[in-house]
Amino acid sequence: MSMRLPVSNPDNKLPNIAIDGPAGAGKTTIARMVARQLGFCHIDSGAMYRAVTLLALERSGESAVADEGTAYLIARDLDIDFLTGTEGDLRVMVQGDDRTEQLRSNRVDRYVSVVASMGDVRKELVAKQKELAEDGGVVMDGRDIGTHVLRGAEVKIFLTAAPSVRVYRRLRQQRQKGVHLSWDEAEDTVVQRDRIDSTRRISPLKVAVDAVTIDSTHLMRRDVVSQIEFILASVIRCPNGG
Ligand code: CDP
């Protein structure tokens, strides 16, 4: 299905689309597909928290990754760029280097939610996220995009799936990279991240009151994309009110 770019809104800005949800729900893949279809920019906010975690692990090791002062300085100086690779895939540049694969390593998975619960880290990254979306035309995925970062987003999606499907997707994603996890290992990281993300004090994962929930357990990716495009079309108003 193809779609015309939305007609301008009163501010003459393209709309923003926020996609939140638990680990392994497919947010990044879907956000990428929606952005490509519409010619929008895709911002993977999780990659920012992952980048701070990766740099903290490299700088201080596992024993000191929870040091808030170090993580804050890394977040403050973070230079992150989202590029499109030759296959149309998302490449994440951190401090000028392509770190896409390392950002999704198991080690980063294990610590990212701890780093993401730090208030000063969140403040820095949220400011960058807001700046990236200020001109509109952005699809941003994460945990607090609809509830906090882009509270005014024209479309808010809460994308979820059954826990077993999310664990399976995580296993498959790692296997494609040649990393073989047991079911229990994959389940542990998914369950633990969800627990920390949903119970943290600052901007926990929750459904925005004005979000549409899509359960992708039994849906193909393209069907999820079509649903989001349909929702977008229904909220866009022509300048003449038509
Ligand atoms: O793609 P996946 O669902 O595995 O996670 P992600 O979007 O890459 O996010 C990794 C982690 O970053 C999450 O588990 C959260 O702890 C944190 N995060 C967050 O706190 N706020 C966001 N807006 C995005 C991610």
Image (cartoon, helix red, strand yellow):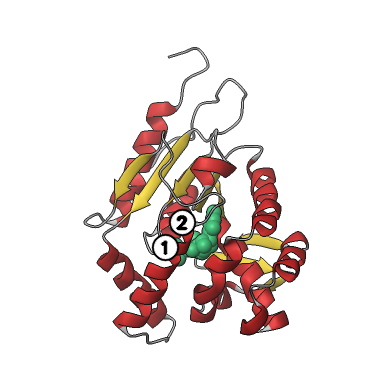
Residue 26, how many percent across, how many down? 38, 60
Going 37% across and 87% down the picture, which residue do you hit?
A: 180
Residue 222 visible? yes
User: Compared to 171, does 213 lie above or below?
Assistant: above
Residue 77, how many percent across, how many down? 78, 63
Q: Which residue is mark 2?
A: 199
Tell me: 91 left or right of 227. right
Tell me: 199 left or right of 135. left
Going 54% across and 38% down the picture, which residue do you hit?
A: 16
Tell me: 199 left or right of 43. left
**Quarter residue 62 falls in:** bottom right
Q: What is the number of callouts on the image? A: 2
Tell me: 121 left or right of 165. right
Please rate how many residues cluster around mark 2, counting C-alpha atoms within 10 Å: few if below 14, some from 14 to 19, many from 20: few
Give the Cα distance between marks 2 and 1: 6 Å
Quarter of the figure that contains the N terminus = top left
Q: Which SS class for mark 2?
A: helix
Going 65% across and 79% down the picture, which residue do you hit?
A: 57
Q: Which residue is mark 1?
A: 195
Q: Are marks 2 and 1 in contact (CB under 8 Å)?
A: yes
Quarter of the figure that contains the C terminus = top left
Q: Which SS class for mark 1?
A: helix
Amino acid type assigned to the residue bearing label 1 in the image: Arg
